[in-house]
Amino acid sequence: MQEKVLGYFFLFLGIGIIFFAALRVYVVYTTKAEPIQLIDAQSNLGFNLSVPSGIAGQNITVPVQMGQLQPMITVINNFVYLIFMGFFASIGFKIAMLGVNLVRPIVIKAKPEAKNV
């Protein structure tokens, strides 16, 4: 009987984790909350490009800016958040399946042995 109580606990805990992950994804994709910021939108993603000049042995450094990256950074952050919450939901699924296996009764059907004549 104690394994059934523990099984129901694991089942409801796993379902709760799955619903939590789904609710967080819904809230993030309806823009009511911000996802985890893997890449900061305010970061400067520029670099210096070294170009050889006409004079032997000298290089000119040209600063290069990446342009408007806000939409791409938002898509990357949302995608990473979705992957993270999918991983979180899969953990909830495994816990719920453990609970289901504890709740389910174990039934063994044995056939009588046939006598060889």
Image (tube, rainbow, N blue to C red):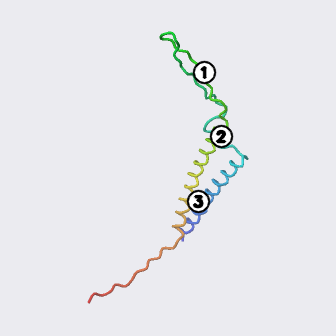
Asked if marks 3 and 1 touch (Cβ < 8 Å), the reply is: no
Measured as percent of width and height from the top left, residue 35 is found at 66, 44
Instruction: Determine whether the residue tagged by mark 2 lies in a helix, strand or loop.
Output: helix
Work out whether residue 35 or residue 99 is closer to the camera in this orientation and state it: 35
Above or below, comparing residue 67 to residue 32 in the picture: above
3 vs 1, front mark: 1
Work out whether residue 51 or residue 82 is closer to the camera in this orientation and state it: 51
Residue 87 circle label: none
**Residue situated furthest left in the rendering:** 117
* Amino acid beneath label 2: Thr
Q: How crowded is mark 1: few (under 14 residues within 10 Å), some or many (20 or more)?
A: few
Instruction: Determine whether the residue tagged by mark 3 lies in a helix, strand or loop.
Output: helix
Q: How far apart are marks 3 and 1 (CA)?
A: 51 Å
Residue indicated by mark 3 = 14
Among the two numbered marks 1 and 2 on one chain, the one whose residue lies closer to the N terminus: 1
Residue indicated by mark 2 = 74
Among the two numbered marks 3 and 1 on one chain, the one whose residue lies closer to the N terminus: 3
Measured as percent of width and height from the top left, residue 37 is found at 63, 39
* Amino acid beneath label 1: Pro
| Residue at x-position 52% and y-position 67% | 102
| Residue at x-position 65% and y-position 51% | 25
Residue 109 in which image quadrant: bottom left
Work out whether residue 37 or residue 71 is closer to the camera in this orientation and state it: 71
Work out whether residue 91 or residue 69 is closer to the camera in this orientation and state it: 69
Among the two numbered marks 2 and 3 on one chain, the one whose residue lies closer to the N terminus: 3
Asked if marks 1 and 2 touch (Cβ < 8 Å), the reply is: no
1 vs 2, front mark: 1
| Residue at x-position 68% and y-position 48% | 29
Instruction: Determine whether the residue tagged by mark 1 lies in a helix, strand or loop.
Output: strand
Q: How crowded is mark 2: few (under 14 residues within 10 Å), some or many (20 or more)?
A: some
Residue indicated by mark 1 = 63
* Amino acid beneath label 3: Gly
